[in-house]
Amino acid sequence: MPRPKATEAQKTESRSKIRHAAAELYREQGPDNLTARAIAIRAGVSVGTLYSHFSDLSELARSLWQGPVDKFDQHLRTLVEVQTDPVKRIELLLLAYLEFARTNPELYQGTFLYVRPANREAPEKQDFATNKMGNKPAF
């Protein structure tokens, strides 16, 4: 008899375990040592389950930082909307960037200062003139 399909709650829990395990391993061992097998073992799932949630390790890594970075992007957009003076606008953006780095050192280092290890596949090229939602960058 085939195993019943996972419920949405089970899928969400499994995805969360995988993300949590990846974040722990990243903190403990750095990006060079992140493997699907190590993450799956730490999360208590199979490698197949990991790949049923994420197409590759790059997508898994993006899932860890994309939300906070999108929130920061929205914060920058809000700052520039209220300031019309270009010099003040730049000053606000720089101060916000520094504050983000100071209050989120791990996220900042992992996203803004990240250097892709040689054994990792390069991400697909993106048009920086617009983001995934078609918006122009805040700066």
Image (cartoon, grey):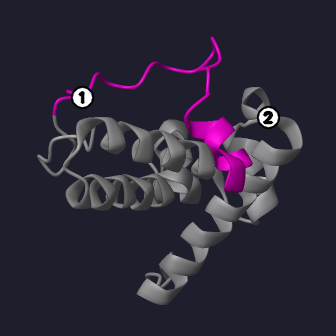
Q: Eyeballing the image, is 7 above or below 43? A: below
The residue that appears at 73% across and 37% down in the rendered structure is 34
Residue 81 falls within the magenta-colored stretch: no
What amino acid does circle 2 point to?
Gly
Quarter of the image for residue 87 reads: top left
* Residue at 43 percent of width and 82 percent of height: 5
**9 is higher (above) or lower (below) than 69:** below
- Residue placed furthest toward the top: 118
- Badge 1 or badge 2: first in the primary sequence: 2
> Quadrant location of residue 32?
top right
Q: Which is the main secondary structure of the residues drawn in magenta?
A: loop
Q: Nearer the viewer, residue 23 or 7?
A: 23
Viewer-proximal residue among 87 and 93? 87
Q: Which residues are magenta?
A: 101-129
CA separation in Å, label 1 and label 2: 27 Å
Residue in the image at 44% along x and 56% along y: 72
Question: What crowding class fits label 1: few (fewer than 14 Cα within 10 Å), some (14-19), or many (20 or more)?
Answer: few
According to the picture, the residue beneath numbered tag 1 turns out to be 128
Q: Nearer the viewer, residue 112 or 118?
A: 112
Q: Which mark is residue 93?
A: none
Q: Is residue 7 visible?
A: no
At which x and y percent is residue 64?
56, 54
* Tag shown at residue 30: 2
**Quadrant location, the C terminus:** top left
Towards the viewer: 89 or 120? 89
Which residue ends up furthest to the left in the rendered image? 134
From the viewer's perspective, tell me whether residue 129 is left or right of residue 63: left
